[in-house]
Image (spheres, helix red, strand yellow):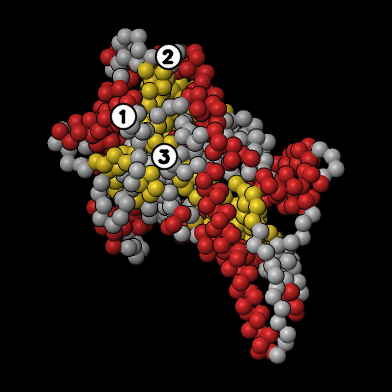
Amino acid sequence: MSKISEEIENLTIELVKVPSVNGTEGEGHIGNKMLSYLKEIEYFKEHQGYAFRVPLKNDKLSRGNIFALLRGEAGQSNKTIILHGHMDTVAVEDYGALKKYAFDPKILKEKLKEIDLDEDVRRDLESGDWMFGRGASDMKSGDAVHLVVLKELSKRVKEISGNILFMSTPVEENEHNGIIESLDVLEELKRKYNLEYTLAINNDYICPMYKGDNTRYLYTGTVGKLLPAFYFVGKETHVGQCFEGINADAIASEVIREIDLNIELCDEYKGEYTLPPSVLKFKDLKESYNVQTPFSSYAYFNYTVHGESPKEAAEKLKKAAERAFERVIKRNDDRYKKYCEMTNQKYESLNFEAKVITYTQLYTMAKARFHGDLDKELESYEQKLVDNRVDIREISLKVVDKVFNIYGEKKPCIVMFFAPPYCPHNTLNADNEKENEIIDKIKESAEEIKKQGINEEFKVMQFFPSLSDSSYLRIDDDDEGIESLTSNFPGWDKVYKVPVNKIKKLNIPAVNYGCYGKDAHKWTERVYKPYSFEVLPKLIITTIEKFL
């Protein structure tokens, strides 16, 4: 093991030992730990203003973004490589009885030997080549690699023409507040030092695509994410007259059946496909038990995109909801007809209509009926919900519910809208000469590593398949698509905002290398040390040399 890889491994253990679960004060502690490491580097002792922390605005958990700027002293180049990643992790409840050891890789390793494990996990544990622990893969190891690489390059600052900017952000695992607020700092540094952001290298974890896959994937972009949500309105009735109404939960269930894991809704871009949509939340809005059928319910989905615009996604999902709604109506009518035959009652068609509208349509109709300033009314309502610390997805729902009641329509209906978060998609376009040069340099860097006798199989892909902070460094959605998103997004710019124009102005090409790991967000999370601590830092340094 080289001195660099040994330091990376030790630093990874130190970082894992600082619990930094998303939504806790630990996110602030891990940031301070990173800053302390940076300030012990000789370069930053001499240039104290170049390593710093910027607190998140109005954050009760004292979280902040960490930055460190290394300015090359060989020539006057303004080219700047960003090394970035996130510092938070998901929670540890999934560890069960091992929960108290989740942040200590050495003790956890011994405890895992005492329990029954899957064959693959047991093999990795016994090999000694894997480090287990929450955040070991996602992504404390990636942070450690970046920090140690920066330290090594600081020793060669007189040989470097250009700049390297380290950046680590909290709140990646849900709302991405850290990276969004970092954009102001990126703009400020760009102005202050006349930086030209040439490339951003994220180090979020990479993993096998299938069992037995040992390929090391290099991603030249990141998948986008939308959160399409549906507000379902039925026609309530007493269960003793169940056929006289239509159950909102039944409508919701059929829409979920239509959309959830539907591979026809995967988005294809130049041979790469997204995963299909997955339902993330479903509930009806009855607050207590009674024998009235549910009047309204609610669901939202994880929906990933490669090139599809929010407008295209909305059109596809609206049609899917219409198909599902029509099936519910037909099924209810067929069952009612059979019930009438069985009980010798007179049958008459139920005559419900499958009506699906967007939030924009609902808002327009409600505004025409509202006496007063609807925008002001909604803004006041949204602020009240924010003050009461209501989850921002629930705020979107409550706004739709309020607007629907203002509209006053009592017929069955589905309202489709978008809720937070919005993660823009982006990728380098090989048809663009400048961007193709970046792709070529990444491929050349991988080839140089292989020429050093390192037996690794690399493959360049267009989209990092998991959600990533890299979404907020560049946006490929056009203005029409973004307008379709924001107009159907309750609370946009008031409760939730992505600084689209700022991102477009910065327009930073963002790639992902990443430590190689398995089972992120699972209690068997682990990182493969030989690649992550030995090969990856060499690949990053080689890439930086190619660009600077």
Element under disc 1: helix
Residue beneath the point at 56% across and 62% down: 323
The kind of residue tagged 1 is: Asn
Q: Marks 1 and 2, Cα distance to the nearest angstrom? A: 36 Å
Q: Nearer the viewer, mark 3 or mark 2?
A: 3
Residue receiving disc 1: 436
Residue receiving disc 2: 47
Q: Is residue 53 above or below residue 482?
A: above
Mark 3 vs 2: CB contact within 8 A? no
Q: Is residue 5 above or below residue 328?
A: above
Q: Is residue 385 left or right of residue 370?
A: left
Give the image location of residue 442, x and y in percent: 28, 31
Residue beneath the point at 33% across and 62% down: 117
Residue beneath the point at 76% across and 41% down: 378
Give the image location of residue 305, x and y in percent: 46, 45
Q: Residue furthest top?
A: 75
Q: Residue furthest right?
A: 371
Residue receiving disc 3: 222
The kind of residue tagged 3 is: Thr
Dot 3 crowding, Cα within 10 Å, few <14, some 14–19, many 20+: many
